[in-house]
Image (cartoon, rainbow, N blue to C red):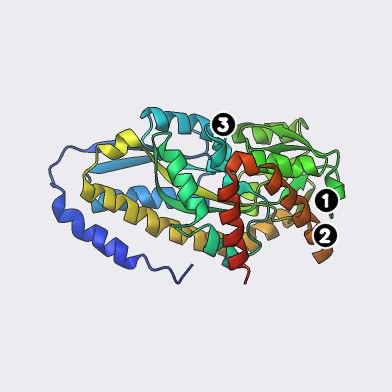
Amino acid sequence: MKKRNFIAGAAIALATLTAIPAMAQQVKARMGHVFAANSTMDQAAQEFAKLVGERTKGRIGIMVFPANQLGGEQAQARELSRGSLELALLNPGSLAGLNPLLDIHYLPYIASDFKQVDAIFYNPKGVLQTTLRETLAKQNIETLGFFELEFRAVTNSGRPVEKPADLKGLKLRVPGSAAIKGFFEEAGTQVVVMPFPELFTALQQKTVDGQDNGASITYESRLFETQKYMTLTNHVYAMGTVASSSKFWSALSEAEKKILTDTAAEVTSKQIEKSRQLNADFLKKIEAGGIKIVRPSAQAMAEFEKLGQGVWGKLSNTYGAERIAALRQEAAAARK
């Protein structure tokens, strides 16, 4: 990610300040998200708010509300769509109830390492970003940038999961995603669709045995405190969006829009880099908290991937055969 240079973009954004009247009436905006305070996602949101304020000479004032203060992601997305919330960090994969295409990036094993991730997920002209941007736009939600939600893992309080067969019978919470739900159903798991804000209590009360989130969310949201095992299945790579309501967006000048998009690109680039640097630290902290970290063998990972590929075919009608074919081509090219 270091190869990505957003310095020039930031400089351009600063240069546009002259186009914004210093005494213009202030626009106040709220920015919500579900992630823990001081997480890499929250840090990106706070920096975004700070820089936008500076670069618009105080014309746009953004206040960040982390940790579900404005509701879960579905609630925040609805408010964005209505125009009653201005900005948010969203995980499109949790919004499939709005449109099934919003969890296309949750198809299992699109990528198996960060080189492939960068080529497929962070390609502005690729299938995933194009699909997510266009689909969110139909919900009156503008996409300003994309950030990392990392590879997902499986945690549970029942038994170590070393191979797909070990998933059978476990009751796992999943987001409202046909792709993730399909993956675990293929393995014989009992899946429970549940909003993220309800997850910790559900784990604590044993309503579900486990869940599937990456190391940072599992640690920073304290989910690991209720679990005994974490398996690094890497079954899905998740990507989030910096989102704006179309109502808020349309009220901005072109100069202001450029500042917001350039600033979003800058802070998400830093967030992606920092997320990857911290991943190993989060795993160590989770392990220190008494959780056994399971790293599946190469054979087991091949079995997990084979299981995941079956989901692609079953969801071809949901995502569109042509779109699936194009995504397969991108994935194949990234593996070369």
Q: Secondary structure at mark 3?
A: loop
Residue 136 seen by the camera: yes
Residue 315 vertical position relative to residue 328 in the rendered view, above or below: above
Q: Residues within 10 Å of mark 3 (few under 14, many from 20)?
A: some
Q: Element type at marker 1?
A: helix
Residue 97's disc number: 3
Q: Residues within 10 Å of mark 2 (few under 14, many from 20)?
A: some
Q: Are marks 1 and 3 in contact (CB under 8 Å)?
A: no
**What is the CA distance from the residue labelled 1 to the residue labelled 3?**
27 Å
- Residue at 64% from the left image edge and 37% from the top image edge: 175
Residue sitting at x 54%, y 41%? 102
Question: Which one is nearer the viewer's eye here, 283 or 20?
Answer: 20
Quarter where residue 111 is shown: bottom right
Residue 60 occupies quadrant:
top left
Q: Quickly name the residue at label 2.
A: 300
Amino acid under label 1? Pro
Mark 1 or mark 2, earlier in chain: 1
Q: Is residue 105 left or right of residue 257?
A: right
Residue topped by disc 1: 164
195 up-or-down from 309: above or below: above
Is residue 233 depicted above or below 197 in this figure?
below
Quadrant of the snapshot with the C terminus:
bottom right
For the residues labelled 1 and 2, say whether their Cβ atoms are less than 8 Å apart.
yes
Q: Earlier in the sequence, mark 1 or mark 3?
A: 3
Left or right of 139, for residue 210: right
Give the alpha-carbon distance from disc 3 to disc 2, as whole Å: 32 Å
Task: Determine which quarter of the picture holds residue 306.
Answer: bottom right
Alpha carbon separation for disc pair 1 and 2: 7 Å
Element type at mark 2? helix
